[in-house]
Amino acid sequence: MPADAFAATVAVLDIGKTNIKLSAVTRDGVIAETLSVANAVRSGPPWRHHDLEGIGDWVFSGLAPLSRRHPLDTFVATGHGSGAVLVGPDPDDGCGVALPMIDYEQPLPDAIDRAYRPLAGSFRDRGSMIMHGATHQARQLLWMETAEPERFARARWFLCSPQYWAFRLTGVAAAEATSRGAQSHLWNTPDARPAPIVTARGWQRLMPEFVPAWASLGTVRPVLAARFGLPSGLRVLTGIHDSSANFYRYQAAGLADAAVVSTGTWIVGMSAATPLDSVREESGMTINSDVFRNPVAGALTMGGREFSHVAGETDREPVDLALALRLVERGTMALPTFGADDGFFPGSAGRGKIVGPPPETAAQRKALATLYMALLTVECLDALQAKDRAVLDGSYLREPLYARLVSAFRGGGETLFNLDAYGVATGTALLASHGSSRARDSLALERPDPLPGAAALLGAYRARWREAVHCQFPSSVPSRKART
């Protein structure tokens, strides 16, 4: 790649569950500008689905002026692992969509749920437990095939959402390892083969060939460039799973040995150093793939939703340490799990509760929620056997106390944090300079200030919290012990 190419800028499309962002990002990871829109969902029929036509108009209409304000030469998309689209052969025929894109959080029909489980294969095949709703792409496919067999039969490809947007732009269909390896239940990452359900249902015809996340699939189609005024030479990369993009950022910067915990709607931990034989399905652990198609141990839970359940209407002020410690001293705890997903604690879904004297103010509720998030984060790191270096990033770092609590609850190992809340966009943009040293320039890691006077108090609090979880869900807490 010519040296002057680094002056160019990358357009990153980040498809989140709640919001969609389109950013201009420099090749060394600086966010120059971001546009955002809600990820609209329609009620149906035939099921609750995302408005891909409206989203497409927003993306392409925003990309044109963005390219006039910034020297864009590359487009690349990233998205969560539950997003996928069944498409036909023509990206211009109804936005390429063969059947509407399922909103994964809606309940699955009982008949589909019953039919799916015997077909899903082993944990090694799936790479995760069977989660709630239509979370897994394989469950979505089974629902589509069962409910709309004629339209399903006419479909050509089943594309993860980053690759769907690459298809819209270029007309080229591709699969990518991190996207397909993110709990899709369609690909066995350790053995590099399709999951059993794919062959059992004859879905191989819907699965395009794997292409590296950083590979160029071509440039924007002339008809699309002319319609929206897009730069005709804009090259389009394959794209990447969102948490894997953040993990790639650290890999590319030489921190491949670190456990990385990204925070937002989900708490997502990833570690290439964790032995696969220690990955436990019942503890909410996963087997992901990195960009090189190597297995990566993961652990995840919907922490953002848990935070909202506990905090309620969020107090805007930072959490006061003294207030948080008063909650600790009086034994106020949030026990899992308030949402519909078990997370790290099998059987806990919908059974979350607050024990001890309840919080009475918005500030107390936020403090309790922050303590709870730090505890869940350490559970994530313990599940990954992360005894040494761990890196925290994402939206939770906006709360200054969070990283300090995680470090104190860990009781050992090096804890670092990155205040850049745009790790997914940065990691995705770095694909455009894959193989260079640009990733190291994008990191500014810090160590949290210690809490020496509170270390013993917090260690004892975590031990009591785990004991309370164990009493409520005896099979949910593994034999690993909290360090105190």
Image: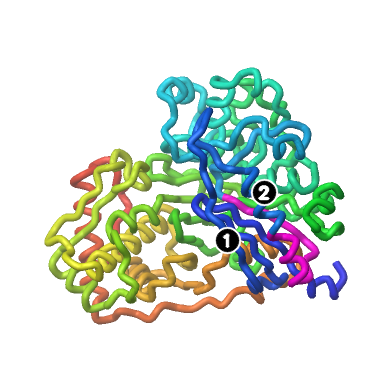
Is residue 484 found left or right of 26 in the rendered image? left
SS at mark 2 in the image: helix
- Please give the residue where the numbered disc 1 appears in the rendered image: 36
- For the C terminus, which image quadrant? bottom left
Q: Residue at x 27, y 40 (%)?
A: 475
Note whether 358 is above or below 479 in the view shown.
below
Image: 84 above or below 265: above
Residue at horizontal 48%, vertical 43%?
Answer: 277
Q: Position of residue 445 (x, y in %)?
A: 53, 76
Q: Which residues are magenta?
A: 62-79
In the rendered image, the residue lying farthest to the front is: 227
Residue 114 falls in image quadrant: top left
Asked if residue 106 is positioned above or below residue 306 in the image, the reply reads: above
Label 1 SS: strand
Mark 1 vs 2, N-terminal side: 1
Percent across and percent down for residue 240 are: 65, 52
User: In the image, which disc is placed on residue 56?
Assistant: 2
* Label 2 Cα neighbours within 10 Å, binned few <14 / some 14-19 / many ≥20: some
Residue at the image position 45 percent from the left and 60 percent from the top: 263
Q: Where, quadrant-wise, is the N terminus in this rendering?
A: bottom right
Q: Amino acid at mark 2?
A: Gly
The amino acid type of the residue labelled 1 equals Ser
* Residue 144 located within the stretch drawn in magenta: no
Q: CA distance from mark 1 to mark 2?
A: 13 Å
Relative depth, front residue between 437 and 111: 111
Between 76 and 453, which is closer to the camera in this rendering? Answer: 76
Residue 154 versus residue 330: which sits nearer the camera?
A: 154
On screen, residue 478 versus residue 389, left or right, reads left
